[in-house]
Image: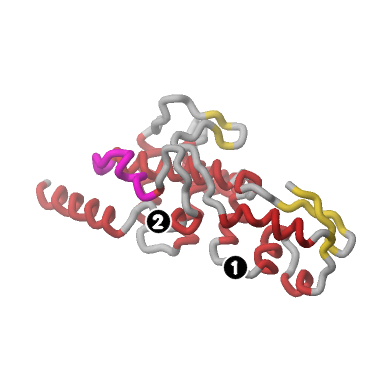
Amino acid sequence: MINIKIDGKPHQLPERWEEVTFEIFLKLIGATDDYTQILSIMLNIPEAELRLAKIQGLDLVIRALSFMSKQPELDEYPTKLGTFDFPKDITFETVEQFEDTRKTINSMADKSIMEQTEALALYSAIYCQVPYDSEKAQYLSKQLYSLPCTEVMAAGSFFQAKCLNMHSGLSMSYLRKSLRFKKKRLDFRSFLKPLASTRLWIVLRVMWAKMTKKY
């Protein structure tokens, strides 16, 4: 974080993706390349107010925001989410967790990019409960919004892919191929494309249709 002053008032501005919360990340999905709009989201200051504001060290601010043009890096296998540490062998502990994740994935098939990205927090919340409580999952997912976006995205996409892997038999590497994990850099715009791509969902729907007709 860098310390800046706007009209004499101190503020902190992220200068790395790891410092951007998941809540801010969601808001950035619909943002343009306008610096005023981006700063408004980052600092929670109305755009109209920012346009006329005096920003001390504006050159430092613009330089700090340059991280947004870089590609964020996500862990292939999440190790932590806030204070929650993941075991080396990450898998669903109960059938209810798997079913709730599967139902959420199915419900997201025709949703917007914003809604599908937002669901990543829910996939994480479903797993990070001991013991698991389905009714508390939605509440807990909102608590994850204050965590670094890179942690929530890494965990959420992992559990999304894990569920699809268990349901379809498709490999984790195939399911996550479009996200370019394995410690490779991830393009910000490409991440916003749903993990369940059109081709993948066609495959799963055909498989499911065959199963229901057969049985």
Name above or below for residue 24 compared with residue 51.
above
Give SS at disc 2.
loop
- The residue to which callout 2 is attached is 194
Give SS at disc 1.
loop
Asked if residue 173 is among those painted magenta in the image, a careful observer would answer yes
Distance from Cα at disc 2 to Cα at disc 1 = 22 Å
The answer to whether marks 2 and 1 mark residues whose Cβ atoms lie closer than 8 Å is: no
Asked if residue 46 is among those painted magenta in the image, a careful observer would answer no
Name the residue: 80% across, 50% down: 3
Q: Is residue 31 left or right of residue 57?
A: left
Which portion, as a residue range, is magenta? 167-178
Magenta highlight: main SS: helix
Which residue occupies the foreground of this view, 152 or 72? 72
Name above or below for residue 13 compared with residue 78.
below
Name above or below for residue 120 compared with residue 53.
above
Work out whether mark 2 precedes mark 1 in sequence or the reverse, and give the earlier one: 1
